[in-house]
Structure formats: structure tokens, C-alpha cells
Amino acid sequence: MRDASAGHGQEHRAQGALLQVHVGYAVSRKGLPASISFRRWVEAALRGARRRKPAELSIRIVDANEGRALNRDYRGKDYATNVLSFAAELPPGIALPLLGDLAICAPVVAREASEQGKALHDHWAHLTIHGVLHLLGHDHVVEAEADAMERLETRILSRLGIADPYLAN
């Protein structure tokens, strides 16, 4: 999922652990968060989930066509969705800090923020954190797990000064 021609890697120490976030823009960057914002949101998610080990992940910002193709090919759903998480599947005995990849569909994020009356920046933060939590193994298929994941997301976002995204508008 890395696009070296359009991406920016950032390496920072986060709570004593090395963090690498690679951001690739497959769309115009105008009006989109900068890679430093994505790194901040990833750090917040890792801190909130109490992950202290080194971590590396890639984030690719895609258009509706690529988002739809990815969702169709990997989930069997023929529409663009907001965020897709692809957890790293490393062979046994390989100990790398790679968490995986996120694909975030810019037009879907913008549409949802507008429809839900949310600040665009806040929605980007929420979906990035949501995707990172998926990479860490959190899920929302079972109701109890969904409730726990939503509470964790809300707590992480609160620490960033962002309101609960699950409250009815």
C-alpha cells in the first residue's frame, strides 16, 4: 500500500517506543490532513490502547474508485467505505513492528462529516484512530466488543479535545 512517490514517512519516539507512520496521498492533498496529524492520531490510538512496543504502519488516502475496488476485492462489498484496515500477517518467527496498512477514502470521509454535522478534522481523527484499533485487534462485530471499542475510541478522542462521535447529532 505504500506509494513512495506521494508518501511521507515519519519516525518519532512515542513513549520510548519507535513509531513509523508512512502516509501516501493518492488524491490531491488540498484540504486533507498533513502527515503530522495522522502521526499524532496514530500515537494517540497506540497510547490509548496501551501499546508500548515499536510500531510501523502505512496510511494511504484514496479516492472513491480505489476505495470501492479495495472494499470489493477484500470485503466483497461493492462501494467505497470510509476506512479499511489490513493487519500485517507476518510468518511465524518474524518479529517486526509492522501493524499493517490503512486505506482511508477522502470523499467518503468528507461526505460523512457533512451528513453527520461533524468537523472534518475530527472525523479524520476518529477514522484514523478507529483503523489503528482494528490493526491492534479490536473489532465491532459482536455487540460487547463494539461497545468496548467505541468507549476506547471516545476516550482517546476526548484526550485530543474531540467530542464523542457516537452521540446523536
Image: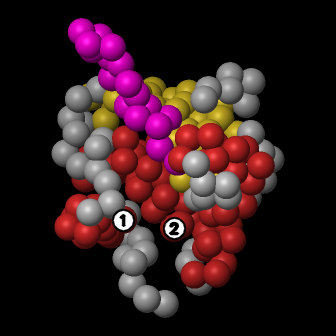
Closer to the camera, 5 or 75?
A: 75
Identify the image quadrant of the N terminus: top right
Residue at 37% from the left image edge and 41% from the top image edge: 135
Indicate which disc residue 157 carries: 1
Mark 2: give few (<14), some (14-19) or many (20+) Cα within 10 Å.
Answer: some
Extreme residue in the top direction: 93
Closer to the camera, 70 or 32?
A: 70
Extreme residue in the front direction: 76
Residue at mark 1 to residue at mark 2: CA–CA distance: 8 Å
Residue at 48% from the left image edge and 52% from the top image edge: 128
Question: Is residue 33 at all visible to an observer of this figure?
Answer: no
Q: Residue under label 2, please give it.
A: 122
Q: Amino acid at mark 1?
A: Leu
Q: Position of residue 7 (x, y in %)?
A: 66, 30
**Secondary structure under the numbered disc 2 in the rendered image:** helix
- State which region is magenta: 84-101
Q: Is residue 115 left or right of residue 6?
A: left
Q: Quadrant of residue 161?
A: bottom left
Q: Amino acid at mark 2?
A: Asp
Residue at 54% from the left image edge and 47% from the top image edge: 75
> Residues at badges 1 and 2 in contact (C-beta under 8 Å)?
yes
- Is residue 138 in the magenta section? no
Indicate which disc residue 74 carries: none
Q: Position of residue 121 (x, y in %)?
A: 57, 65
Q: Position of residue 23 (x, y in %)?
A: 59, 36
Residue at 39% from the left image edge and 78% from the top image edge: 166
Closer to the camera, 15 or 113?
A: 113
